[in-house]
Amino acid sequence: MLKKLKQQVCDANKALVEHGLVTLTWGNVSGIDRDKNLVAIKPSGVDYDELKPEHIVLVDLDCKVVEGDLRPSSDTPTHVLLYQHFKDIGGVTHTHSFHATMYAQARVEIPCLGTTHADHFAGPVPVTRPLTPDEVDRAYEHDTGTVIIDRFADLNPLEMPAVLVAGHAPFCWGKSAKESVKNAVALEAVAQMALGTFTIKPDAPRLEDYVLNKHYQRKHGPDAYYGQAKK
Amino acid sequence: MLKKLKQQVCDANKALVEHGLVTLTWGNVSGIDRDKNLVAIKPSGVDYDELKPEHIVLVDLDCKVVEGDLRPSSDTPTHVLLYQHFKDIGGVTHTHSFHATMYAQARVEIPCLGTTHADHFAGPVPVTRPLTPDEVDRAYEHDTGTVIIDRFADLNPLEMPAVLVAGHAPFCWGKSAKESVKNAVALEAVAQMALGTFTIKPDAPRLEDYVLNKHYQRKHGPDAYYGQAKK
Amino acid sequence: MLKKLKQQVCDANKALVEHGLVTLTWGNVSGIDRDKNLVAIKPSGVDYDELKPEHIVLVDLDCKVVEGDLRPSSDTPTHVLLYQHFKDIGGVTHTHSFHATMYAQARVEIPCLGTTHADHFAGPVPVTRPLTPDEVDRAYEHDTGTVIIDRFADLNPLEMPAVLVAGHAPFCWGKSAKESVKNAVALEAVAQMALGTFTIKPDAPRLEDYVLNKHYQRKHGPDAYYGQAKK
Amino acid sequence: MLKKLKQQVCDANKALVEHGLVTLTWGNVSGIDRDKNLVAIKPSGVDYDELKPEHIVLVDLDCKVVEGDLRPSSDTPTHVLLYQHFKDIGGVTHTHSFHATMYAQARVEIPCLGTTHADHFAGPVPVTRPLTPDEVDRAYEHDTGTVIIDRFADLNPLEMPAVLVAGHAPFCWGKSAKESVKNAVALEAVAQMALGTFTIKPDAPRLEDYVLNKHYQRKHGPDAYYGQAKK
């Protein structure tokens, strides 16, 4: 079932290694088929270089395994909640990439300091609140999704395809599994650059709003002119 | 047309990856044929490992595509303006290499702290002013070139083959596409070293002018004795 | 003798290189056969890429060589003392991985700032006291073990599989040689992330205890649900 | 002539790349034949991956080329002066490795903060004085050697096989070309670790002298027991 989606999700998980975003097995990518409401996700604790499309687990929106011999990622309930609330996304990537995780641990949002950031994220990358003891105890992974949804009450997830979970690490998303990985790459880069920028100049200025908007729109707006026209 | 130039520009773009200067597709190199006034440049948003000489786009000095099936880099108007004003350069490289971009985001020039810097840049690497809202709105990429040209009113682009565009990233140039990449490599290195030097000693001294001049001249002056004699 | 153990120890030593944990020959991994009370350990000063299972040296719990043509690692007495006191461990890894060593040199424990840390270490990673002049003079490598054992008087080595030896570098351990390497990878990562987190925010908060416990238990507790069920 | 030495020097130059010590062509290694008083050194500005033993240039102790079609490294007079004054060394390595260069630019000696340092350098790695305008003007590369020799008036070059030239970069040496590269690797590592250690704790303590001596002696003293016995 869903062979093409499984292949895409498998490739996207392997891309985490190529981009230097993962250590050991600390990361997972999923993709959704919106017609069937099935999520394809990495199995838990499996090495990326051993991963094959047939290992990818299919779960429904209740996190029940529909196909696959392996346990799905322990972060599956977070992925699923994001798909339920962010209706236009098609892929989710979770990593512990080092610099984004530093900001998540510091619980400091990443302000937009330059056009690299503006090309991918239409504003500062937000941080969630910490989970409560009750949330951690009752439904930890599900409520990791809850604190993300709470934080996005006034944010558009397509314009801000990343979040830092306080004391944990980033989650990114996009229109496909592959695009969610690209956003994870961009997030790690802007986190590293932000850290360095503030080391050089602790009161570094935010990028002017009119440049931020220009850069975001030239890549993502209705008149985008970056890249090749879609066929 | 211009097969050799296209090959050089293709090779130079691929060299960005080998030198670790690019993430995703954030970088582009061009070269110019000064007889024909044609610029060969990377197509927009194409992966470096898929890039072939026949993908390289030829544009004239009005940024019109003269040959090629793909859209040229969205940064083409910046490259072209540099060729128009810096008459002796033959290649331009734009990257978002991390440490140079940190300085561009901090909007802090990179002072000459050592001979690595002096071997390539005859003084502090300058930062442009930010673009005005009007410039961003009207002709963003063209005026990214304008703020560079403005900044170089009193600078010799052959002695200072790099600039940091405020809130954006570096542009470098050289006598050829290949040399512009070398300058981008050197810029990233001196940016990283400057950041570390100031972390060790916030009031680190500038390199003595007489050493700066000696190093720059032994590589680039009329009596240069670094490297092998040109045949 | 103990061919399988030698192969595992050889593989684990080579994994140090793959994970970027070693420079030159600054690291060694050992494993123990608890039935025979024999420790298999890397020979001293041998390059990892030349290492073969037959080079692995077998020593008894008095550090006497039982099998092997090469000298065992000079750190052998430290490994052996750890096996004698930490009865449930099966492997030990010693490296000078850069960020963990920075903390060892600063003699600062690594507090738990996020779930990456909590997934592997049930609290702050401890630092030993310095060795006394007498300890260094008399039995340096053995007493490197002594200061570790002293520090663990009130700690459970299975819940805290790492230590920073003051002014030296980390030692890690686990149920097998392979697991001790995984803990060394995790330690280096959390050290680098801690350094960056405090650069972003000098008073970064410790991870809430209830999250630390949840993460540690979901990977290591009796009801662990991370990874695939053991067959 | 001296085929074996040329091969060793060629290999040692290529090892700079494997160890990540060089960018572009910023580094060179030489070796000396003490019987013939001939120095084998890298040609200037040649890429490491194109380097072959027959490219290695032989010069005498007056820096005159005795054999070879290419110009020797522009740093040759520095290498030669070191061989003239440090009678027991057999190889010299010069790099602009990033972290050692940061300390050279900051003009701050690298104190001994841990056993990694003590294993290679018997005390803080020293910094030279800057060259005078006259020295730079008259015999720049020769006097780069002079300021090193001056700094070592009271130091034993075999116990301290590295120096930081103020505002420039490190020079390292050893009993052979290969050993000088190993010391350059160790220097870069201890520089990076020192920078990180002071970031964690600005007043990090120096390693106790009795540990420094123990570590240095166990590797280099008359009763050294690290590594395999020489056959």
Image (cartoon, coloured by chain):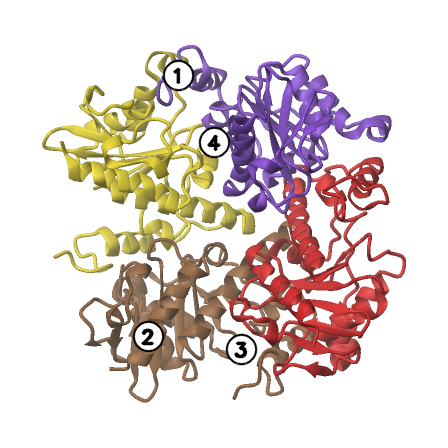
Chain colours: A red, B purple, C brown, D yellow
Can the viewer see residue A164?
A: yes
Marks 2 and 4 on same chain: no
**Residue A117 lies in what quarter of the image?**
top right
Mark 4 falls within which chain?
D
Residue B226 vs C145, above or below: the answer is above
Q: CA distance from mark 4 to mark 1?
A: 16 Å
Residue C171 spot, x, y in % from top left: 42, 67
Q: CA distance from mark 2 to mark 4?
A: 46 Å
The tag on residue C159 is 3
* Label 3 SS: loop
Mark 3 or 2, closer to the camera? 2
Which residue occupies the foreground of this view, B20 or D148? B20
Mark 2 or 4, closer to the camera? 2
The tag on residue D105 is 4
Q: Could you tell which of marks 3 and 2 lies nearer the N-terminus? A: 2
Marks 4 and 1 on same chain: yes
Q: Could you tell which of marks 4 and 1 lies nearer the N-terminus? A: 4
Residue B117 vs A118, above or below: the answer is above
* Label 1 SS: loop
Q: CA distance from mark 3 to mark 2?
A: 27 Å
Residue A157 spot, x, y in % from top left: 82, 58
